[in-house]
Image (cartoon, helix red, strand yellow):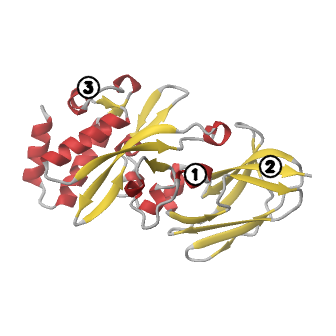
Amino acid sequence: FKSTGAISKYINETFSTDHEKFRAVFRWVTDNISYNYSARNANAQEVFKSKTAVCNGYSELIKLLCDSCNIKCRMVTGFVKLDLNYLVYKNDSAHAWNIVGLGGREYLVDATWAAGQYNHSTNKFIKEFDELYFLTPPETFILNHFPDYLVDQLLKNPITEETFRNSPLFCYKAFNYEVTSFLPVSSTIMVKRNDKISFSYGMTYPPVHMSVELLNGLADTHPLQSDIVFQGTDDRVSFNLQFDNPGEYFLCICFDEEDAIYYKLQVTK
């Protein structure tokens, strides 16, 4: 395509419903635009020409193409929790995404995160489409995206910024399971040695296998006791943990061998 107008013309002539048109818009952007920090000040037309963007560029281009296809869409700004460093330094990251109106309902999408992943250690973008950030349920999206305006959470009962900041760190793999509730609700767990802690997660798609790992810092990882009893139903998994050794750790809850949820753990004598 030689212009954004040519893209929208093709989409309008090829697809009939707003859902089909938006799916085409979203896939074109995520398939053709790569994340590049050097494009941080680019507008939608500059993003189209260079095929590079940061989150604002992705969101602006989605909005521009939606406008051309007569699809209701708006940009949303806020901040996100990116990685384990958030639990250490509480350093959030500014971000942008979109809300789209389809069939009388509003939906959340994040084209930046759907397009692939940026490897900060190699400074390279790995393009790999991720379905998790297309029409994501609001209850799942809020796990790691917090908008500047509460109305943009699309939740019946929006959460506060304090609640978001103090909640556990959810890795993007947790989105696969559509976690809807969780205990403990705080990212920092303080417990006395050998005292029991109860964990419980409500989710639409419970994992086949669960495990728990302790991190002695950001790199040293080892599995926790293998005799953990995981009790599950169709929509909830629960278990209890005890810790013998006082100290500060990171606790990782793994779903099907993938890091899913992180806590900061303080065990006292």
Numbered disc 2: secondary structure: strand
Q: At which x and y percent is residue 101?
A: 25, 59
Query: Which mark is drawn over residue 269?
Result: none
Q: Is residue 218 above or below residue 142?
A: above
Residue at image position (23%, 44%) is 63
Query: Which mark is drawn over residue 162?
Result: 1
Mark 2 closeness class: few <14, some 14–19, many ≥20 residues within 10 Å: some
Query: Which mark is drawn over residue 266?
Result: 2
Q: At which x and y percent is residue 138?
A: 42, 60
Does residue 143 appear left or right of residue 45 in this picture? Answer: right
* Picture quadrant where residue 182 is located: bottom right
Q: Are marks 3 and 2 in contact (CB under 8 Å)?
A: no
Residue at image position (88%, 48%) is 246
Residue with the mark numbered 3 = 50
Query: In the current view of this chain or complex, which residue is farthest to the bottom?
Result: 233
Q: Amino acid at mark 2?
A: Gln
